[in-house]
Amino acid sequence: MAKGAFASRSLKKARRILDDLEETSIVSDLIFLENLNSWHVKFKLKLILDNNITAFPSETDWHLLIQDQEEYAAIKISPDRLNGLKTTYEHQFFNVETTDDWTSGYPCLEDFGYSLRQDSFSAQPVIIDERLKWYVERLIDWCKRASQNALSKDGDNFELPMFYLNPTGILVINESVEDFSNTWNTNKEMFGSALLNFSMNKFFLINILNIKGEFIRNCVEPKRLVPMTNEVALEVPGVWIKLNKVPVYENWSVVKTWKELNKISSDEGINLSLLIDKIYPSLKKSLPIPFLVAFPISKLKGGEKALMHIQAFVLPPPKVLAKTIRKEFGKQNKVKALMSGLENITLDWMTTENWNWKESSGRGQLKHICNKKVLLVGAGALGGFLAEAFVRGGVSEITIVDNDILRFGNLTRHLLDASSVGKYKSQEVANYLRKININVKVNFFNLSFEDFIRTESVAGYDLIADASASDSVLNQISKLGKINFFSTAIGFKAENLFLIFSQAEEVVLENIYSVFRATIDLEKIKAEKEGFPTEGIGCWHPVFPADISDIMLAASLSLKWLEGMYNKNENRIAVIPISKII
């Protein structure tokens, strides 16, 4: 017997829970499964249900898998392959047969549904017997709710069904609430062709076209994808259909064959034969065909449709299908033969990722700078981290101005790497930012700020942010009149942070220097006593003394301060003594 295959006293105590609960009884007792490194128990669940509501079975068999025997044991409960649940419900993994005695459809017992959390949520117990009891009681609760169609209620966050049975790739879409209102909701087309780019093992949806090949919607500009990979993107044609509802049947089971999809499409008035007939001849015969299924979803269950979601699977290349058709169907009508050949194909759904920034940045979107157009002066260490924070925070457009070249010594505290040494900081930071957010427009100018404003207009920017630590830039800014202006600079040894925000009126240099002067004079004295570190050999080259943690902290504090000041319609000049707050 394998090491660890002896049931501990704690595990045996936990297993008795299944005898103690009124609804459960053991079918086969504890056995150790070496291939899964788990203990296994099969048990029966008997419930008194109102079968007038659903056809949920009152008796079902379940398989309990337990890894580890003591604290924080990993527990999973799955339906029996023969006497378990046959369909999929909300808050459950896609339920199909596996090579084991149980199916893949284990319920999400740890965190399923706001209504359940509201009624019975508590922190998971740690000790094995208490933990197992908690899981089984959650299963009983889940089954009762499933039998009553009560796993979710109107007002809960909408949850997609589980599409990811055998993921064959990733589909990247770019869908927002605005796109739904402005394009999908106004266009009456129900199917057509599509253009995708394949790179980084992902299908990027580029264009949606109608059945005639006429443009309907641009989803992502291909040039926005170029910085993300060194690969040459492969153009892949595809097809799409638009359904009015989520493609599920029997509670929450996703369609898994072409035959089932054809039935659901036909019920909504979509003729897949016509789609194949019109588009099939134009497809590249040797490439797999991405088939996109678009359908509207709401943000909350029972709410208005607000967003278009798209799932996709890949059909075999037309060349492969044609060979099968000739072999099995001879010379009959090509479309009819193709439809017959597709009928029993299993749909291997891809994973879908929505790369729209508004829809995917809820965990870290800036409150006030989001969707703003920013001009950033200075792409040094501090400016680089601010630029990254702006882009990750959701600005709509950023323009970077700096005429400095990246040196090897800069790498100790700059976000760029050695491949950018000897190149303009502004251009290299811009290239870095384009890899973060395909939705943000990024511009750069390898110019000093003085040269930039001589040839370019600052009108139209929501904010000018200065991270140059240059009196010359402040002087130029003061001549621009009333603007939204923010400046940040680090003092000697990063002990102080100098901050300016001007919104109510034009920038006045004397006001700035009157606030900063006392601190700057003290820093000059310290600098003369302590000196600056040097870099390189030959001509004496002093450098600013601060490490990467200083720069990142200063960037974070600067951004928090800016977010606090924005929209207050006032001027503010401040010195933050960093050394005193840490």
Image: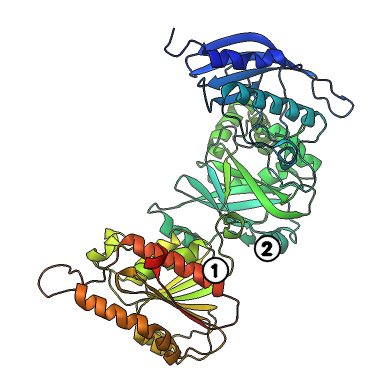
446 or 182, which is in the foreground?
446
Residue at coordinates 59% horizontally, 59% vertically from top-left?
A: 219
Looking at the rendered structure, which numbered label has been put on residue 178? 2
User: Where on the picture, by quarter, is residue 15?
Assistant: top right
Find residue 396 and name its label: 1
Q: Residue at x 35, y 64 (%)?
A: 550
Image spot of residue 281 (x, y percent): 60, 46
- Comparing 136 with 37, the one in front is 136
Badge 2: residue crowd in 10 Å (few <14, some 14–19, many ≥20): few
Answer few, some or many: residues within 10 Å of disc 1's Cα (few below 14, many 20 plus, some between 14 and 19): some
Q: Is residue 531 visible?
A: no
- Quadrant for the C terminus, please: bottom left
Please name the amino acid that badge 2 sits on: Glu
Residue 548 in the image, given as x and y percentages of width and height: 33, 61
Label 2, secondary structure: give it. Answer: helix
Residue 333 position in % (x across, y down) = 68, 36
Q: Are marks 2 and 1 in contact (CB under 8 Å)?
A: no
Q: Identify the mark nearer the N-term, 2 or 1.
A: 2
> In the image, residue 537 lies at what x, y percent?
11, 69
